Image (cartoon, rainbow, N blue to C red):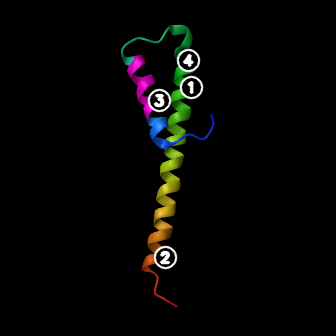
Amino acid sequence: MPDIKYSKAVEKLEEIIRKIENEEIDIDELSEKVKEAVTLVKLCKDKIEKAEFEVKEIVQKFDAPAA
């Protein structure tokens, strides 16, 4: 899956979940949609972890005493 924005990934994930909950997904495509959902969850998790790491780095630099 190409690198997509976090908000778009969440949007797509919510759509898949809604369709599953409303039984709008045919059994033949259910497996594919679940795989896509897992990929989207991983992508979102990775983006959150990356942002958290970057924010921590920024805060550490901000808090570091001036040389």
Disc 2: CA contacts within 10 A as few (<14), some (14-19) or many (>=20): few
- What residue is shown with label 1? 35
Q: Are marks 1 and 4 in contact (CB under 8 Å)?
A: yes
Q: Amino acid at mark 1?
A: Lys
**Position in image of residue 13 (x %, y %):** 45, 30
- What residue is shown with label 3? 12
The mark tally for this picture is: 4
Q: Residue at x 44, y 77 (%)?
A: 62
Q: Is residue 49 above or below residue 20?
A: below
The residues tagged by marks 3 and 2 sit, at their Cα atoms, a distance apart of 36 Å
Q: Quadrant of residue 7?
A: top left
Report if residue 16 lies within the magenta region: yes
The residues tagged by marks 3 and 4 sit, at their Cα atoms, a distance apart of 16 Å
For the magenta stretch, what is the residue range?
Answer: 11-20
Q: Amino acid at mark 4?
A: Ser
- What residue is shown with label 2? 61
Q: Is residue 47 above or below residue 32?
A: below
Which tag is nearer the camera, tag 1 or tag 2?
A: 2
Q: Amino acid at mark 3?
A: Lys
Q: Residue at x 63, y 37 (%)?
A: 2
Q: Secondary structure at mark 2?
A: helix
